[in-house]
Image: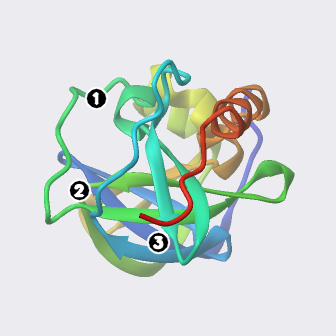
């Protein structure tokens, strides 16, 4: 049985296809417009590429793959959400759009599992705003420790280009 939550928290609400998700605003560093990613040959399956964010190399997770959504090429209208990942790392993921920063009354993870059983391990709850259901994404599930270790190893193995 899932843990119970019953509180109001502020979330960054984002959209992937027609589904709304929320992520705790305290974990968000910044939201940026879509940008070219550096591919990582033979990288872990969830690694979409690397983003140079003000001189810091940030791994970008393919959240669509993780959530089992249909693949989609990045468009100029997409957004990249840069967040604090476990182990004091920065990481990011691409979403279709940002709905806003909203206070949401979250309910239990049990309810999240009933709505999307296949995503229950990734959700910390479900929220509602008016007639819209918002799945509250658990920040630690976006970036599981084992996968982040694989990604960090893949990044470390990449040659770094200095200058043109």
Instruction: Identify the mark nearer the N-term, 2 or 3.
Output: 3
Residue for point 18% across, 36% down: 72
Question: Where 54 sits versus 73, above or below?
Answer: below
CA distance separating discs 3 and 1? 20 Å
CA distance separating discs 2 and 3? 13 Å
Label 2 packing within 10 angstroms: few (<14), some (14-19), many (20+): some
Residue labelled with disc 2: 96
Residue 160 or residue 37, whichever sits in front: 160
Q: Quadrant of residue 105?
A: bottom right
Residue 18 or residue 161, whichever sits in front: 161
CA distance separating discs 1 and 2? 12 Å
Front label number (2 vs 3): 2
Under circle 1, the secondary element is loop
Under circle 3, the secondary element is strand
Work out whether residue 134 can be spotted.
no
Residue labelled with disc 3: 12
Question: Where 150 sits versus 97, above or below?
Answer: above
Residue for point 65% across, 41% down: 143
**Pointers 2 and 3 in contact (CB under 8 A)?**
no
Label 1 packing within 10 angstroms: few (<14), some (14-19), many (20+): few
Q: Quadrant of the N terminus?
A: top right
Q: Quadrant of residue 39?
A: top left
Residue labelled with disc 1: 69
Q: Quadrant of residue 27?
A: bottom right
Residue 18 drawn at (x, y percent) = 18, 47
């Amino acid at each position: 049985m899932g843990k119970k939550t019953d509180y109001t928290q502020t979330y960054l609400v984002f959209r992937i296809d027609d589904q709304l998700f929320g992520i705790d605003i305290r974990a968000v560093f910044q939201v940026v417009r879509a940008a070219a990613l550096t591919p990582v040959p033979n990288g872990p399956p969830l690694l979409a590429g690397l983003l140079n964010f003000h001189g810091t190399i940030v791994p970008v997770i393919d959240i669509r793959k993780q959530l089992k959504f249909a693949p989609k090429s990045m468009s100029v209208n997409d957004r990249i959400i840069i967040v604090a990942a476990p182990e004091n790392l920065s990481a990011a993921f691409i979403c279709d759009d940002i709905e806003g920063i909203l206070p949401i009354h979250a309910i239990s993870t049990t309810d999240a599992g009933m709505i999307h059983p296949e995503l229950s391990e990734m959700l910390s709850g479900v929220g509602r705003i008016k007639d819209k259901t918002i799945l509250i994404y658990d920040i630690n599930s976006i970036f599981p420790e084992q996968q982040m270790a694989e990604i960090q190893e893949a990044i470390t193995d990449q040659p770094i280009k200095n200058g043109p």
